[in-house]
Amino acid sequence: MFKDPKQGWRPDFAHLRGRVYLAIAAQIEEAISLGIFAPGDRLPSQRAIADDLGFHLNTVNAAFREAARRGLIRSSVVRGGTIVLG
């Protein structure tokens, strides 16, 4: 489990349809729109999300790429993490 409350974010996949990575990206988008994650916040690491939700790391990586493609987040090696753009 995550130590930071925002890192305790738990997407709802009860009604999962279609590709999992798209569902994860949609949950990231929803969390941003609901204010769970604000611009400048760091998302939990891909590995932490994969481990916590029981998905393969490659699936979560694809979800982050999709969220970045949608302009929701950006990964920064220099800053060390994935930042919400808002």
Image (cartoon, grey):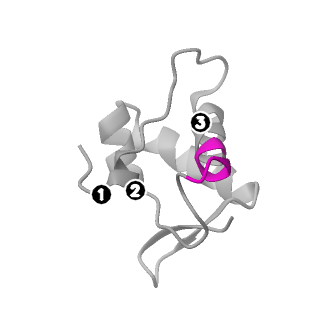
Check if mark 2's residue and mark 1's residue have beta carbons within 8 Å: yes
Image position of 31 with respect to 73: above or below: above
Nearer to us in this view, 76 or 39:
39
Q: How many marks?
A: 3
Q: Earlier in the sequence, mark 3 or mark 1?
A: 1
> Looking at the image, which residue sits at the far front?
35
Decide which of tag 2 and tag 3 comes sooner along the chain.
Answer: 3
Q: Is residue 8 rendered to the left or right of residue 73?
A: left
Question: In the visual, does 58 lie left or right of 74?
Answer: left
Tags 3 and 1 touching, CB below 8 Å: no
Kindly identify the amino acid type of the residue bearing the numbered disc 2.
Answer: Pro
Dot 3 corresponds to which residue? 21
Q: Which mark is residue 4?
A: 1
Q: Write the residue at 53% across / 51% down.
A: 36
Residue 20 spot, x, y in % from top left:
57, 29
Q: Amino acid at mark 1?
A: Asp
Badge 3 crowding class, 10 Å Cα cut-off, few under 14, some 14 to 19, many 20 or more, is many
Name the residue that disc number 2 marks: 44
**Is 15 on the left or on the right of 43, as rendered?**
right
Q: Quadrant of the C terminus?
A: bottom right
- Which region of the structure is painted magenta? 30-35
How far apart, in angstroms, are the residues tagged by discs 3 and 1? 24 Å
SS under mark 3: helix
Label 3 vs label 1, nearer the camera:
1
Q: Residue at x 66, y 38 (%)?
A: 26
Q: Residue at x 64, y 42 (%)?
A: 30
Amino acid at pointer 3 = Tyr
Residue in view at x 23 percent, y 43 percent: 1
